Image (cartoon, helix red, strand yellow):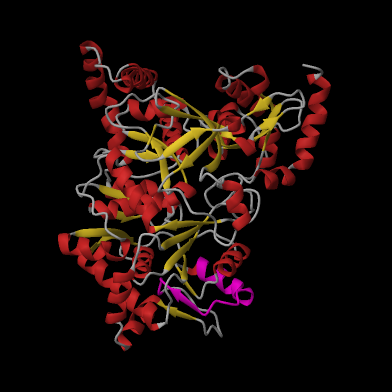
């Protein structure tokens, strides 16, 4: 049952309800096992954080920053801060020193909590330029502090600070004065084109978001969730808070690269994720089919075809599956689908929210075909995550992002832009009045920057308006739609479309090097380096054929005519990706400007006036 009280009291109230029942789980890497944290222990740690922040004279609505990967301590700090009406400002664990300098100075942060060695080292680089920073609190006792560091203490030391005085009365007064109009968080957006913007989220926005999500989907204290995405991301943050509010167990995944192992160990009923996660699962299944014997491959293909037909033509449309087809599906479930779900650790699945980018129809059909209840949705940081999502018992059209949640006003504006108004919409950007005025008009409509249309109650996304490219021939191209089609292929890890003011569409492609190298070995293709492999004409011909198949539904002017294979992946560290793994197109285009110009110059000779 949803407990939608103010977050300053939530953990305490849940502790009174659930006591020693498990609230959080985390993997202890030294002991190699998952450990439980009860609601009572959770509440005790939250209170100790509150008291220590008061001992440090943390003010009402003062900003406190958390720079860490997912850890239970992140939640202790969040709710400890909420208990004294402070605001938490989470930083992505992969943020660079210049990024955290900007955010610390913008939010005038005095206290910074850091996770492990990487975050501590970055924070120490930033200190000389952060004039408000007074104290760094380190979660992990194994972090090696730098010589001469007088600003940092460890988290256990911090918790003892609150024991040195009598702050209980002040804590009670702050909790009693807490309002839903108070700021809860400032979430800095990814910033694909420049500095991040601090999105202000109030407790009232979360209160409403929890209410409308709870009306749309059935999430209860019987569920076990794996926290996979960074808690800095509004999707994971809102999802985690909802889980705490219904009493579901939160299994906190520390390292994103360990998610496959964590799934098998925790075997959750729910997990929020981005489409790329499911694309990788789909690619893995296609690899298994490619490696299987002819008989096994045929069975697996027939199983997928049957599952897709059942989902797409019947279940998704609210129709009953014909008895003979239902029987076939039941047989394939025992032979194929259930084996796959067990292998992934998803055999106890309830539902799996997916958002953050376009989900290809091919991937969506596959996930449902094997009996995994993917719930596709759409949302933004500025809308406290969920704007739309698929609904149980209602028609689901593959390719849509679901139906609008209750109580949120929407309309389609100029250039098909989606406009939103309601209780989950941000009041604006921190310290940025002019930017706020550009995004929220005088009638209170938030301009999302996303183009879309509504058909039969479902929202379909078209493109990011600012990302819309116009070729030199006057044709408009939606790069994300093309990229989502390409990324389904098992040989393609990343794809970035190039088209703006160009005569035709091209792409920068990061291949799956492991699979490409295996293919080269099978075909007897000799190469001395990744650079040489990416230049090989046989490799280009093979990928060109696969890309052409992926593009069959596109108009001629939308199709990728030529491409460049990149020998190195795009990464956060090189500045080509944001912390949410969105492509920083200007950075990528600038880095590969010479190669792109060369491609168009050479292609022009054979492309002509087509």
Q: Which is more toward the observer, 477 or 419?
A: 419
Q: Which residues are magenta?
A: 118-141
* Location of residue 312 (image quadrant): top left
Position of 43 with respect to 405 (left or right) is: left
Where in the figure is residue 439, as x and y percent of width and height? 58, 47
Position of 384 with respect to 217 (left or right) is: right
Where in the figure is residue 330, as x and y percent of width and height? 22, 21
Rendered view: 510 above or below 6: above
Where in the figure is residue 277, as x and y percent of width and height? 44, 40
Name the quadrant of the C terminus.
top right
Residue 298 in view? yes
Q: Which is more toward the observer, 7 or 298?
A: 7
Rendered view: 499 above or below 567: above
Q: Which is more toward the observer, 148 or 212?
A: 212
Residue beneath the point at 45% across and 25% down: 362
Give the residue furthest to the bottom. Answer: 164
Residue beneath the point at 54% across and 28% down: 485
Q: Which is more toward the observer, 31 or 481?
A: 481
Residue 491 in view? no
Where in the figure is residue 65, as x and y percent of width and height? 48, 68
Rendered view: 585 above or below 539: below
Residue beneath the point at 16% across and 60% down: 17
């Amino acid at each position: 049952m949803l407990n939608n009280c103010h977050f300053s009291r939530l953990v305490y109230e849940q502790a009174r309800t659930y006591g020693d029942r498990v609230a959080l789980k985390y993997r202890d890497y030294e002991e190699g096992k998952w450990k439980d944290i009860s609601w009572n222990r959770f509440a005790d740690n939250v209170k100790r954080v509150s008291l220590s922040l008061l001992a440090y004279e943390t003010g009402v609505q003062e900003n406190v920053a958390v720079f860490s990967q997912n850890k239970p301590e992140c939640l202790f700090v969040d709710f400890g801060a909420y208990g004294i009406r402070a605001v938490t400002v989470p930083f992505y664990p992969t943020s660079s020193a210049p990024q955290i300098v900007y955010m610390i100075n913008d939010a005038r942060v005095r206290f910074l909590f850091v996770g492990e060695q990487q975050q501590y080292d970055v924070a120490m680089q930033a200190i000389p330029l952060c004039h408000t920073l007074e104290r760094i609190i380190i979660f992990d006792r194994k972090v090696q502090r730098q010589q001469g560091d007088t600003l940092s203490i460890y988290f256990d030391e911090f918790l003892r600070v609150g024991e040195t005085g009598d702050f209980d009365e002040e804590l009670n007064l702050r909790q009693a004065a807490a309002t839903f109009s108070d700021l809860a968080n400032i979430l800095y957006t990814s910033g694909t084109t420049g500095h991040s913007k601090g999105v202000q989220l109030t407790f009232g926005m979360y209160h409403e978001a929890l209410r409308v999500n709870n009306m749309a989907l059935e999430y209860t204290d019987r569920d076990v969730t794996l926290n996979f995405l960074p808690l800095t991301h509004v999707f994971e943050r809102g999802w985690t808070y909802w889980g705490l509010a219904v009493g579901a167990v939160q299994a906190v995944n520390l390292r994103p690269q360990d998610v496959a192992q964590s799934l098998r160990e925790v075997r959750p009923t729910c997990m929020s994720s981005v489409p790329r996660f499911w694309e990788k699962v789909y690619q893995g299944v296609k690899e298994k089919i490619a490696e299987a014997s002819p008989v096994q491959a045929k069975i697996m293909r027939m199983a997928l075809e049957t599952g897709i037909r059942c989902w797409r033509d019947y279940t998704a449309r609210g129709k009953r599956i014909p008895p003979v087809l239902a029987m076939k599906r039941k047989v394939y479930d025992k032979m194929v689908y259930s084996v796959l779900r067990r292998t992934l650790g998803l055999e106890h699945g309830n539902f799996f929210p997916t958002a953050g980018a376009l989900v290809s129809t091919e991937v969506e059909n596959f996930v449902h075909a094997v009996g995994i209840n993917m719930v596709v949705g759409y949302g933004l940081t500025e809308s406290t995550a969920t704007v739309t999502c698929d609904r149980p018992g209602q028609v689901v059209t593959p390719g849509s992002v679901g139906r609008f949640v209750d109580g949120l006003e929407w309309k389609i504006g100029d250039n098909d832009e989606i406009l939103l108004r309601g209780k989950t919409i941000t009041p604006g950007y921190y310290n940025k009045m002019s930017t706020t005025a550009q995004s929220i008009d005088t009638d209170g409509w938030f301009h999302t920057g996303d183009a879309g249309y509504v058909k039969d109650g479902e929202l379909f996304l078209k493109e990011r308006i600012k990302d819309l490219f116009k070729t030199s021939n006057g044709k408009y191209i939606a790069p994300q739609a093309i990229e989502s089609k390409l990324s389904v292929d098992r040989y393609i890890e990343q794809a970035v479309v190039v088209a703006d003011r160009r005569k035709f569409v091209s792409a920068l492609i990061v291949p799956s090097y492991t699979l490409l190298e295996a293919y080269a070995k099978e075909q007897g293709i000799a190469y001395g380096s990744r650079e040489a492999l990416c230049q090989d004409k046989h490799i280009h011909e093979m990928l060109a054929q696969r890309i052409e198949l992926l593009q069959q539904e596109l108009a001629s002017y939308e199709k990728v005519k030529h491409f460049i294979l990149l020998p190195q992946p795009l990464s956060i560290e090189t500045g080509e990706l944001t912390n949410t793994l969105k492509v920083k197109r200007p950075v990528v285009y600038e880095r590969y400007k010479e190669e792109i110009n060369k491609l168009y110059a050479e292609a022009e000779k054979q492309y002509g006036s087509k």
